[in-house]
Image (cartoon, grey):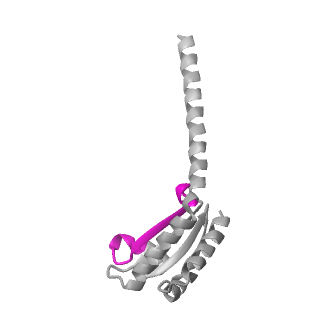
Amino acid sequence: MKYLSNLFAITLLFGFSACNSNAQTNSEANTQKTAVVEVIDFHNTHRCMTCQTIEDKTKAALQEKFPEAIAEGKLVFKTVNVDLEENYDIAADFEAAGTALFVHTRKNATSQKTDLANFAFMNATSDNGKFEAGLVEEVEKALQQL
């Protein structure tokens, strides 16, 4: 009987240590997942040509210049409709009431937001490549911070 109780105690000890080991691994994995650059395109339900162009050119530039970062999950593109109730918190956090473009860098507990809205409105509709070049430059800077 004593042998069985010792065996049971040892089994529990190994079981708890295995759970603790997995918890540390999961915690480390969650820390790594928090290092990300998000490019967020805020918009209203009804969109003008410039607003749609900002989204289209942003998607194309990111897919062309950063396919590896996207595949690795280091770079994420999001569109957020500020008119939808479920997006209220994120829109309020970025103070976005309409069309806006942000590069948001998150690493562990730090967060940095770069507002590109004015830049996007001034350059997205021209064909001189300035929009794409400026966006790529900002995303490269953000990815270097990870």
Q: Quadrant of residue 88?
A: bottom left
Q: Which residues are magenta?
A: 69-89
In this rendered view, identify the residue nearer to me: 52 or 130.
Answer: 130
Residue 64 location (% of width, % of height):
53, 66
Residue 68 visible somewhere in the drawing: yes
* Residue furthest front as drawn: 127
The structure residue drawn at horizontal position 48% and vertical position 75%, both measured from the top left corner, is 57
* Residue furthest right as drawn: 144
The structure residue drawn at horizontal position 53% and vertical position 14%, both measured from the top left corner, is 4
The structure residue drawn at horizontal position 45% and vertical position 72%, both measured from the top left corner, is 90
Residue 20 location (% of width, % of height):
58, 38
Q: Is residue 78 magenta?
A: yes
Residue 74 visible somewhere in the drawing: no
Residue 134 location (% of width, % of height):
60, 79
In this rendered view, identify the residue nearer to me: 17 or 130.
Answer: 130
Rendered view: 117 above or below 18: below
Position of the C terminus by quadrant? bottom right
91 with respect to 118 (left or right): left
Q: Is residue 101 magenta?
A: no
94 with respect to 52 (left or right): right
